[in-house]
Amino acid sequence: MTLLDKDGVRLAVDGAVATVTLTNPDKRNPQSPALWQALTEAGSQLPGDVRIVVLRSEGVSFSAGLDRRLFGPDGIDGKPFFQALAEQPDEQVDAAIDGFQKAFTWWRRPDVISIAAVQGHAVGAGFQLALAADLRVCADDVQFAMRETGLGLVPDLAGTHPLVRLVGYARALELCVTGRFVRAEEAERTGLANLVVPAAELDAAVADLTAALLAAPREAVIETKALLAGAGSRTYDEQRAAERAAQIRCFRDLAGTGG
């Protein structure tokens, strides 16, 4: 069932699995404020029984990054995009970027697990969108790159936090400042990719992973995700306490005595 199809984004739901697809393959799925708004809408329209969200793209590239028209004097809507932002007060620019970031933040909500199926180029905003998901299954032709710094910008679409957590500060700094490509072998070795498969097997690998993730009871998955997501900000003893509290809730749920 298709719930949304606009501005290069399609949301379809089949039972417990939702699929969000970028649908502008001829231009390598460029990103723009309109696409980010559509991605935000997709997140808000997820039915409550969805457990897995798959993020994928049509065509040879996941997303080649920002729509190049944003850098031109006419922008997309007839006015220069970056200059128009720069002319606004700091508070308005901050609010605008916060709105853009919402397209990248809902993928890690506690009640779903998100999987990005990434093929070809995932550059700049495309890299950050892949990083927004909990897990990444990549084709063996994948090419990640963070190009913002070379354009005089910073990665500001919520990608720096997961990047540092996945590969560490030093490698993240090097990747962002040099803008070099990370290909499949390095992506898997450094933790950017959970799994790398031949391009022809990408959809099947995502389907297999989805089935495996759905095999466990939903409440146990939610509790486990929350434990792991918060582990980095807790002390060892705090994490032990969090484990105990989560297990008590699981006991109650299994016994049917939960409040």
Image: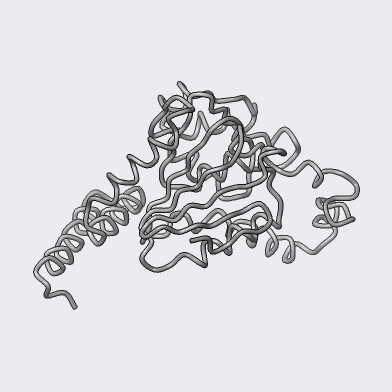
- Residue 194 drawn at (x, y percent): 38, 34
Say if 8 sits above or below 153 in the image: below
Residue 141: image location, x then y, percent? 53, 24
Closer to us: 62 or 245:
62
**72 relative to 87, above or below:** above
Q: Nearer the viewer, residue 60 or 36?
A: 60
- Above or below, comparing residue 30 to residue 246 in the picture: above
Q: What coloring was used for the rendering? A: one colour
Can you give x and y, in whole percent of width and height, for residue 153 in the image?
72, 42
Question: Residue at image x 19%, y 58%?
Answer: 241
Q: Residue furthest bottom?
A: 259
Q: Quadrant of the C terminus?
A: bottom left
Image point 11% across, 75% down: which residue? 257
> Could you say where residue 97 lies in the image, as x and y percent from the top left?
67, 58
Say whether residue 60 is left or right of residue 255. Answer: right
Seen from the viewer's position, the closer of residues 157 and 126 is 126
Image quadrant in which you'd find residue 198: top left
Residue extending farthest top: 185
Q: How many numbered discs, if any?
A: 0
